Amino acid sequence: MPELLKDMESAVPLIVEFTYRLLLVGGLFTLLFGILTLVAPDRAIGLGTRLNHWYSTRRGTRPLDVPRHIESTLYRHHRLVGGVVLLGSLFTLYQLRITHGLAELERFLALLGLPSPLLQPAAHALYALLLLGTVFTLTVGAIVFVRPSALKAFEERANRWVSARQLGAFMEQRYSQPDSFFQAHPRLLGTVITLGSIYLISIVALVL
């Protein structure tokens, strides 16, 4: 874990600089579009109409939303599955208890930009959560290794299928109000887009 944090510390400046440059390029494109909307609103509306295509994610995610039953395979190879879970849990427990896991968690949260007053309580809460989760996983792995049928009742209550496509169905609806507003007030939106782009480019340029 210390080696991972060192790699993260060296990678964070590169990620931040890449993000700023990406914002700068995006700001330049939106600035050009804003100016086009102010100067030639009809051409901007036409460009928006040509680019405005509907892509449904439901068709692409359909294979991911099919239940796949692996219970029989897990029960048939319960010692292998239980052994892997046990080894993974023991390794995680070793990392948490032996290699100064609490201090490493504080460094990790500091890398994420968490304010200093919140570092210690957040690290303790996350440490306790990870520790409880590891102990729970260790217990489940031991039961699966020795006697998987003991989890039958728990499995029947917890094994429920939740369709992500049904939960996200509202995101697949078309909303034409923004397009209608843009076509009715192109110069107003062009002004907002241009000013916002100039502000974004100025901030990013100062940072870089």
Image (cartoon, grey):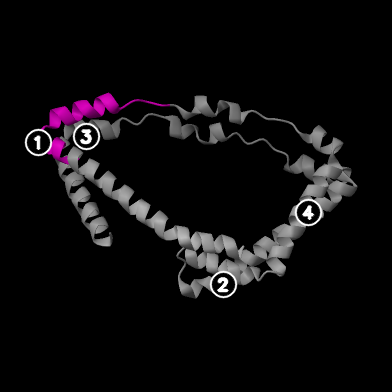
Near-viewer residue (113 or 208) = 208
The image quadrant of residue 81 is: top right
Q: What is the CA distance from the residue labelled 4 to the residue labelled 2?
A: 29 Å
The residue indicated by pointer 3 is: 182
Q: Quadrant of residue 52?
A: top left
Q: Nearer the viewer, residue 152 or 3?
A: 3
Please tell me whether residue 78 is drawn above or below residue 1 in the rendered image: above
Do the residues under discs 1 and 2 have CB atoms within 8 angstroms?
Answer: no
Residue 136 appears anywhere in the view: no
Q: Earlier in the sequence, mark 3 or mark 4?
A: 4
Badge 1 element: helix
- Disc 4 element: helix
- Crowding around mark 1 (Cα neighbors within 10 Å: few <14, some 14 to 19, many 20+) is few
Instruction: Say which amino acid is labelled 3.
Output: Phe
Q: Are marks 2 and 3 in contact (CB under 8 Å)?
A: no
Q: Residue furthest right?
A: 146
Where is residue 35? Give x, y as percent. Answer: 14, 40
Ranked by sequence position, the earlier of labels 3 and 1 is: 1
Residue 149 x %, y % = 88, 42
User: What residue did someone put label 4 on?
Assistant: 87
Asked if the magenta segment contains residue 8, the reply would be no
Mark 3–mark 1 CB contact (< 8 Å):
no
Horizontal side, residue 28 vs residue 120: left or right: left
Name the residue beneath numbered marker 1: 39
Inter-mark Cα distance, 2 to 3: 47 Å
Residue 121 image label = 2
Residue drawn 90% across the image and 46% down it: 147
